[in-house]
Amino acid sequence: MATRGFVISRLPGFNPIATLVFAALYLPIIILVIYSFNAGRSVSGWEGFSLKWYAIAWENDAVKAATIRSLYLAASAAVISTFLATLAALGTTRRRAFGGQTFIYVMINQPLMVPEVVSAVALLIFFAMIKQATGYAGMGYLIAAHSAFCIPFAYLPIRARLEGMDMTLETAAADLYASPLQAFRFVTLPLLLPGIIAGMMLAFVTSLDDVVITVFVKSAGQDTLPTYMLGQIRRQVTAEINAISTVLLGLTVLLLTLFFLLTRKKN
Amino acid sequence: MSPAEQAEVTRSARNGWLLSTPALVVLTLAAIGPLAIVVAYSFMPPGEYGNVAWGFSLEAWQGILFTKDIFDGTLAWADANLTIFWRSVKLSVLTTVFAFLVGFPTAWFIATRPPNARALWLFLITIPFWTNLLIRTFAITEIIRKEGLLNTVLLKLQIISQPFEMIYTDTAVFIGMTYVYLPLMVLPLFASLDRFDMRLLEAAYDLYANPWQVLRRVIMPIVRPGIIAGSILVFVPSLGAYVTPRLLGGGKNMMIGNFIELQFGQGRNWPLGAALSVTLLIIVTGALLVYVRYANRETRHGH
């Protein structure tokens, strides 16, 4: 077995490059986090540890409003898209291939294939028409747009879970005189739940991170946290942005870790 | 097939469609349908204060490549537009190539870890992938801008006497895009390497192949689908990039994505913006079709 180590190390220079890549991926993020605790204004110099930028962000009404809006939007989009994706996943897995199935796949994955800026422009135009016709300018547009582009993200883990599930359990339930609805409620759904939660988390993160579509679709005074940050970065950069970024980063890493643990268990 | 079986198949297909319908309705209304309106808008004349005027016009499509002289109506190449297209394509290709050059060793590194550690390394690639693109671009901004960390450190160490300007250049956009899209290259490369049977390497070495030959003749053919998938996944968002060129390229170093936005903002030329969007969509669809064709051919050869 001595040959194992020798084989792997025979591709020269690969490991140093990989190490550099990991360092390069994380260094900017780590620096950003560190400087969110800087007492000074920006990354020009370290002036001591301080939570002042977190306090400033916390006191900032615009940040507060944007945070609430972001969470409300992401939660709505995650719930709606996961519900739709669950139905679609049940419809497209574990049955004999039927006509139009490929069409359904393409439709569901379409938001992943079209450049975001094109989708954003399309929604801007379409919603401008509706706005003009109805006069409605609420959050409905953002919720509809986010729900749509979150569907593929919710769909993928749910479908993966369904495909890995044992169908004999449902057959057994049917043999024991469970109605289709009972079989779904007491057998399929509990087994599927980790997939649904995983899908919902991915949808939530995807919605929370969106910049481009939100920038185009939002009406005046509908800033989410990312669009608020985009506006601030353009004006003047203070470590307040670092503090907000750090909180968002923390939330994303937390959700991803949960997702990681949730999907790993089944193996 | 008996009539009962036939009925069961029909019922199953109908249920499949019924269950998928709610998702399809939302996608049609808030994702796919609006694309059709963009196509229609690209054939209309611009309105005076933005939006469009009713009517048919090919002006927008002409405006992608040409400008019309206001006085004598002669057509000339729209140099500003061509510069933006060239920059978009150039930076996207550079980003894709460079992401592959550093992404491949990284994927290889992850694939050759012991199984337990592999999941963790993979997770470390996945975190940046799911992390807000704006935050990651901003992190790069903090390092390379004029008063940023790089200049501060270099000045303190007296390596340079004056801060150098890297931000708001094509190089800055290239660095930023490579940084934000790299995980999209590593993940599919890893997926194809993960299935790679490492014993093939031993066989190749036993037959006196040198490392370069092994890479070219043994590894490359097997990971080609991963390379194509990774390249598409990096190239497509690079070409349509909006946030990264906006933050790192500034107003002067626009890419197509920013140019499209400009038409809907200050430019007040919605039809041109629509025509540009359709063009971008066509290019991306072309790339995806090439991918589908290649990917299918690979699997057919494989079996």
Image (spheres, coloured by chain):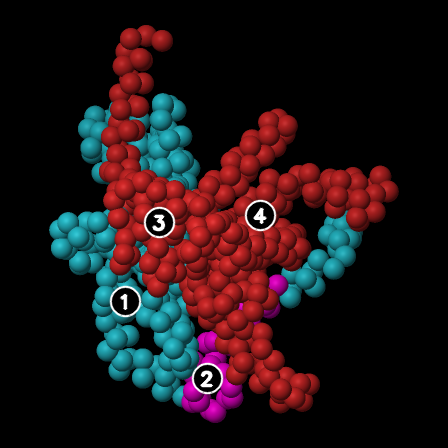
Chain colours: A cyan, B red
Q: Are marks 2 and 3 on the same chain?
A: no
The furthest residue to the right: B208
Q: Chain of mark 2?
A: A
Q: Which residue is label 4 attached to?
A: B231
Residue A116 position within the rendered picture, expressed as x and y whole percent measured from the top left:
40, 52
Q: Which residue is label 2 attached to?
A: A42
Q: Secondary structure at mark 1?
A: loop
Q: Residue at x 45, y 65 (%)?
A: B246
Q: Residues within 10 Å of mark 2 (few under 14, many from 20)?
A: many
Circles 3, 4 touching at the beta carbon (< 8 Å): no
What segment carries the magenta color?
A21-49
- Looking at the rendered structure, the kind of residue marked 4 is Ser
Label 2 and label 1: CA atoms lie apart by: 24 Å
- Looking at the rendered structure, the kind of residue marked 1 is Asp
Q: Which residue is label 3 attached to?
A: B271
Label 2 and label 3: CA atoms lie apart by: 42 Å
Residue B156 visible at all:
yes
Q: Secondary structure at mark 3?
A: helix
Q: Are marks 2 and 1 on the same chain?
A: yes
Q: Is residue B131 left or right of residue A215?
A: right
Q: Is residue A62 left or right of residue B250?
A: left
Q: Which residue is label 1 attached to?
A: A223
Q: Residues within 10 Å of mark 1 (few under 14, many from 20)?
A: many
Q: Is residue A33 left or right of residue B166?
A: left
- Looking at the rendered structure, the kind of residue marked 3 is Pro
Q: Residues within 10 Å of mark 3 (few under 14, many from 20)?
A: many
Q: Residues within 10 Å of mark 4 (few under 14, many from 20)?
A: many
